[in-house]
Image: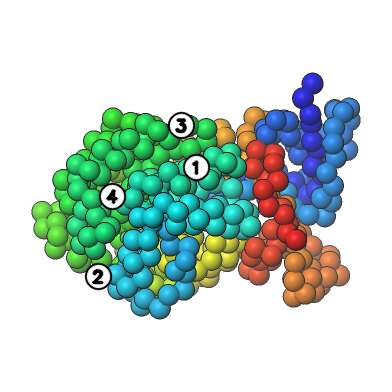
Amino acid sequence: MSELTLYRGEVFDFIDSPLNRKDAYRYFPDGALVVREGEIVDCGPFEEIKGRYTDYELVDYSGKLLMPGFIDSHIHYPQAEIIGMYGRQLLDWLEDYTFPAEQAFVSSEHADRMAHFFVEELFRNGTTACMAYATVHPTSVTALFSVASEYNMCMLTGKVLMDRNAPAGLTDTAEQGKSESRSLIESWHGKGRNRYVITPRFAISCSTEQLIAAGRLHEQYPGTYIQTHLSENKDEIDSTLSLCPDCQDYLEVYERARLVTDRSIFGHCIHLSDSECRRLVEAGSVVAHCPTSNLFLGSGLFDMQQANRVGMQTVLATDIGAGTSFSMLRTMGEAYKVQQLGGYPMSVFESLYKCTLGAAKALHLDDEIGCFGKGRKADFIVMDYAATPSQQVRMDYLKRHGKWTLENKLFGLQTAGDERNIQATYVMGKRVFTLA
Ligand code: GUN
Ligand code: ZN
């Protein structure tokens, strides 16, 4: 018999979307999670679970929240060094800070160092899976997949394709981009928990030929994903439409290249027309809302209520380094404020869903991550509700008033929480981070 570990604590996960039903989650205030060989074997009330097993190691996190690790569906690992640079809006910020930082990834030593930093920073923030942009350099992809493999982490990434409107040190050609991507797919896609993401940066930096090559590559490797940016900033949209005068709107640029699929994740999508929204829904594509980035670059306010109304699949993401925090708790907190400005006080269950099971479903990974269903990988986090004096007095107040409810606990984490609340992070049942 292989070893069982039983983690005791407040166990929480989703079984469905909270937009579909009220009881979309499971919550066991004194619960247990049972793990064997990196996979979830069981979960439920502690008293029930402990009677089912005889020989196990008990890890006691009583009073702490055990939930599936966060999934960050849009993040740029080479931008970890440039968070919070005064770049004003998107296009200046790319030119002044992003492109210079990405050029340093021509050095594989630098890429390797930053990949280690990045993955460890994700774990410190409770993020156990992500869909990341690398740079144009194939070695940047190799570095990230290699580090993720050391931890057995679920990693989705790919080489950025860009053959125009960027410095010489950051451009490829349509042909080179395709052959380098192909060889990375052959080496990494499906190897361990790695998946390849075909990554045309955005229409401004990709010629029509390059976008078409990217679409063809996805058709040749249908298990891969596609990620790009769409309709983030008004100047970006104007510039795109002047570069692609035959297209009616921004989305059409990608549609013509067959890049709009149910395995495509579009970052931002703030300024879409009704027609673009409808076509994204019809294609089954996913929209990554990145609130800290949108606020930081002054890009605009994403309308989640409208997205929900039309049945768009949305997820939450940091978009580091335009995003200002690695923390999905901070990201949820800022998403709430953005939606407040649109008259939609989004529920904490909706936000949490969109960076756990909702993201896993959107990325076709829900048989592996996102919840505590049997056979899922044991990627989970342990959260402390009261990591700061201010959080402590809030908790005391709610307890005194009989209002220490699940919703109030989670909403507090969302509003005031960050990496200080992450007590431990586990990947396939192995502890990869613990708060000192
Ligand atoms: N559009 C094209 N590239 C980028 C990027 O690196 N970050 C953001 N936020 N938007 C982009
Ligand atoms: Zn981005």
Q: Earlier in the sequence, mark 1 or mark 4?
A: 1
Identify the residue position indicated by label 2 in the image: 235
Compared to residue 124, the image places residue 372 above or below, namely above
Residue type beneath disc 2: Asp
Q: Is mark 1 within 8 Å of ligand 1?
A: no
- SS for dot 1: helix
Residue 69, x across and y down, in percent: 62, 48
Asked if disc 2 and disc 1 are in contact, CB closer than 8 Å, the reply is: no
- Visual colour scheme: rainbow
The image shows residue 26, relative to residue 240, as above or below, that is above
- Kindly check if marks 3 and 2 are in contact, taking CB atoms under 8 A apart as contact: no
Q: Residue 226, position in %: x, y? A: 35, 43
Closer to viewer: mark 2 or mark 1: 1
Q: Nearer the viewer's eye, disc 3 or disc 1?
A: 1
On the rendered structure, is 162 left or right of 398? left
Q: Which mark is residue 190?
A: 3
Of pointers 2 and 1, the one earlier in the residue sequence:
1
- Mark 4 and mark 2: span between their CA atoms? 21 Å
